[in-house]
C-alpha cells in the first residue's frame, strides 16, 4: 500500500510539472501537503528521498523498472511516464478517480475517468493549514497589516474542532447555511447573471445560543479560513484609528479569500446614531457601512457574518446591508433535547434527557454544555467516570443559581 501511495505521489508530481494548466487545487490535499515550502508550492515539484520516506514504501518502489534515484541530488526519478501510468492504472483505478491531476492525464489518454468529477472530490488549497501560514507570512511583511493581525484571530478549517452536524440548528438556520454553500459553488453563475449581493448574514440572539460556534462550524464545513474579530478589539482608544482598523480588517479578509469574516459584538460600533454622538464614532460607523457595501461573496470570495446580542442597538442602515437575518433564540424543547444528546453522546451514565429538557427552560446551548461539564466533574470527584441523574440535577440547579446571580447585579 505504501508503495502505491509513493508511485501516486511521483506520478502526480510528474504530470503536474508537464501540464501548466493544472493548478495547486488539482493536487490531492494529502499529496499537496508534502510539497509546501516557505513560499507555498512551487513548480517543478521534486520528490526528494526525504519526502518519499514520509510516504513510505521507498525500497519496494525503487525495484520498479520505471523508477530510479539520483544519488547526488537524492531525487526520485521517473524514467518512463508511459510505463508508470500503465502500471498504476492496472493497480489503483480507485485512486485515479479521486486524484484530479491523474484523472486529467488518464482522461486525455482515453481511460474512463472524469477530471471534473475528481476535482469535485478534492479540497482546494485554501483548506490547508500550510497555505494559510504562507499567506499570513506575506501579510506580516507589511508593517500596517502585521499590526492588524494581532487584533484578529485567523483559523484554518483544519484547526476548527466543531462540526456542523454537532451544532443543534433548526431547519431555517440549516437552510441559510446551505444557501451560502450553494452560492460558493455557483459564484461564476451568480456573477454572470448579476446577482452579487450574496453572503452577508447577521446573526442575532442572546449570548450562548450558538452564533460563534455556527460561524466556526461553517468554516470547517466549507473548508475555508475564518477571520474572527470582536469590534471592541479594533475600536482604538485613539478613536480616530478605529476607521482605519475597520478598513484593515476587511482588507485582510479580501487577501485571505475565500474566507469567512466573522465580526462579533457588532453593536459595539454599529449602534444607533444620536445627534450628540462623537464625530469619530460617526466616521467609524460610516466606514463600517462602506466596507460592508464593498465586499461580497461572489466578487471577493468573502462570506461576512456579523453577530450581536443586542439587535435593538443597531442602526437601521446596518440592517439593510445584510441579505439575511438569522435568529438564534433561546432553544426550544426540541433543540434543547438535541443539545443534551450531543453533549452526553460520549458520556456513560444513567440519566433521563427528557426530564433534563423540562428542567432547563430558558437555558441556552452554552448553559446546557455547562450543566454537562459540571456533572462530569462531580462524578470525577467521586472517582467515577459514570454520570448519574443526581449529578446532572445538581448541575442544573448550580447553573440556574449562577444565572440568577448574574441577573441580580
Image (tube, rainbow, N blue to C red):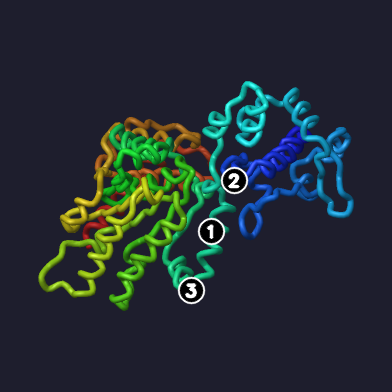
Name which quarter of the figure residue 53 lies in: top right
For the point 89% across and 51% down, the residue is: 71
Q: Nearer the viewer, residue 262 or 309?
A: 262
66 on left or right of 272: right
Reading the image, the residue beneath label 2 is: 24
Q: Position of residue 82 (x, y in %)?
A: 77, 31
Examine the rendered structure and indicate whether residue 285 appears above or below residue 358. below
Residue 330, by quadrant, is top left
Q: Residues within 10 Å of mark 1 (few under 14, many from 20)?
A: some
Q: Residue at horizontal 20%, vertical 52%?
A: 319
| Above or below for 167 versus 36 | above
Give the quadrant of the N terminus: top right
Q: Can you identify the residue that label 1 sits on?
A: 135
Which residue has dot 3 on it?
A: 143
Tell how many labels.
Answer: 3
Please tell me which of labels 2 and 3 falls first in the chain. 2
Instruction: Check contact, mark 2 vs mark 1: CB within 8 A.
Output: no
SS for tag 3?
helix
Q: Is residue 225 visible?
A: yes
- Percent across and percent down for residue 306 are 31, 53
**Where residue 278 appears, x then y in whole percent?**
18, 75
CB under 8 Å between callouts 1 and 3? no
* Direction left: furthest residue: 275
Q: Secondary structure at mark 2?
A: helix
Task: Estimate the spatial distance between the alpha carbons at disc 2 and disc 3, rounded to whole Å.
Answer: 29 Å
Q: Nearer the viewer, residue 239 or 25?
A: 25
Amino acid at each position: 500500500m505504501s508503495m502505491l501511495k509513493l508511485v501516486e505521489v511521483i506520478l502526480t508530481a510528474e504530470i503536474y510539472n508537464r501540464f501548466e494548466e493544472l493548478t495547486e487545487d488539482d493536487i490531492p490535499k494529502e499529496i499537496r501537503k508534502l510539497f509546501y515550502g516557505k513560499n507555498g508550492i512551487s513548480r517543478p515539484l521534486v520528490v526528494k528521498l526525504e519526502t518519499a520516506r514520509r510516504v513510505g514504501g521507498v525500497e519496494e518502489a525503487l525495484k520498479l523498472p520505471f523508477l530510479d534515484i539520483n544519488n547526488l541530488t537524492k531525487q526520485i526519478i521517473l524514467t518512463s511516464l508511459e510505463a508508470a501510468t500503465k502500471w498504476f492504472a492496472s493497480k489503483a483505478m480507485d485512486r485515479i478517480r479521486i486524484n484530479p491531476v491523474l484523472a486529467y492525464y488518464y482522461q486525455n489518454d482515453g481511460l474512463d475517468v472524469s477530471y471534473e468529477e475528481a476535482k469535485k472530490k478534492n479540497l482546494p488549497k485554501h483548506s490547508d493549514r500550510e497555505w494559510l501560514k504562507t499567506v499570513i507570512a506575506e501579510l506580516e511583511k507589511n508593517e500596517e497589516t502585521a499590526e492588524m493581525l494581532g487584533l484578529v484571530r485567523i483559523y484554518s478549517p483544519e484547526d476548527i474542532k466543531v462540526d456542523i452536524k454537532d451544532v443543534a440548528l433548526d431547519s431555517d438556520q440549516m437552510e441559510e447555511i446551505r444557501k451560502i454553500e450553494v452560492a460558493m459553488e455557483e459564484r461564476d453563475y451568480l456573477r454572470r447573471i448579476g446577482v452579487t449581493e450574496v453572503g452577508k448574514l447577521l446573526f442575532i440572539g442572546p449570548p450562548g445560543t450558538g452564533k460563534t460556534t455556527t460561524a466556526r462550524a461553517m468554516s470547517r464545513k466549507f473548508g475555508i479560513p475564518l477571520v474572527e474579530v470582536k469590534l471592541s478589539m479594533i475600536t482604538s482608544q485613539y478613536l480616530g484609528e478605529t476607521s482605519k482598523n475597520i478598513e484593515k480588517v476587511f482588507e485582510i479578509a479580501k487577501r485571505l479569500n475565500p474566507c469567512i469574516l466573522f465580526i462579533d459584538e457588532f453593536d459595539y460600533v454599529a449602534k444607533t446614531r444620536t445627534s450628540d454622538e462623537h464625530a469619530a464614532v460617526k466616521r467609524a460607523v460610516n466606514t463600517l457601512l462602506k466596507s460592508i457595501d464593498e465586499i461580497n461573496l461572489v466578487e471577493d470570495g468573502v462570506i461576512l457574518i456579523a453577530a450581536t446580542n443586542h439587535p435593538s442597538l443597531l442602526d437601521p442602515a446596518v440592517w439593510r446591508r445584510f441579505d439575511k437575518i438569522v435568529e438564534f433564540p433561546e432553544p426550544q424543547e426540541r433543540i434543547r433535547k438535541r443539545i443534551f444528546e450531543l453533549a452526553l453522546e460520549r458520556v456513560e451514565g444513567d440519566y433521563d434527557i427528557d426530564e433534563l429538557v423540562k428542567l432547563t427552560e430558558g437555558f441556552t446551548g452554552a448553559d446546557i454544555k455547562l450543566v454537562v461539564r459540571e456533572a462530569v466533574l462531580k462524578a470525577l470527584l467521586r472517582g467515577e467516570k459514570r454520570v448519574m441523574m443526581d449529578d446532572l440535577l445538581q448541575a442544573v440547579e448550580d447553573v440556574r443559581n449562577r444565572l440568577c446571580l448574574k441577573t441580580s447585579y
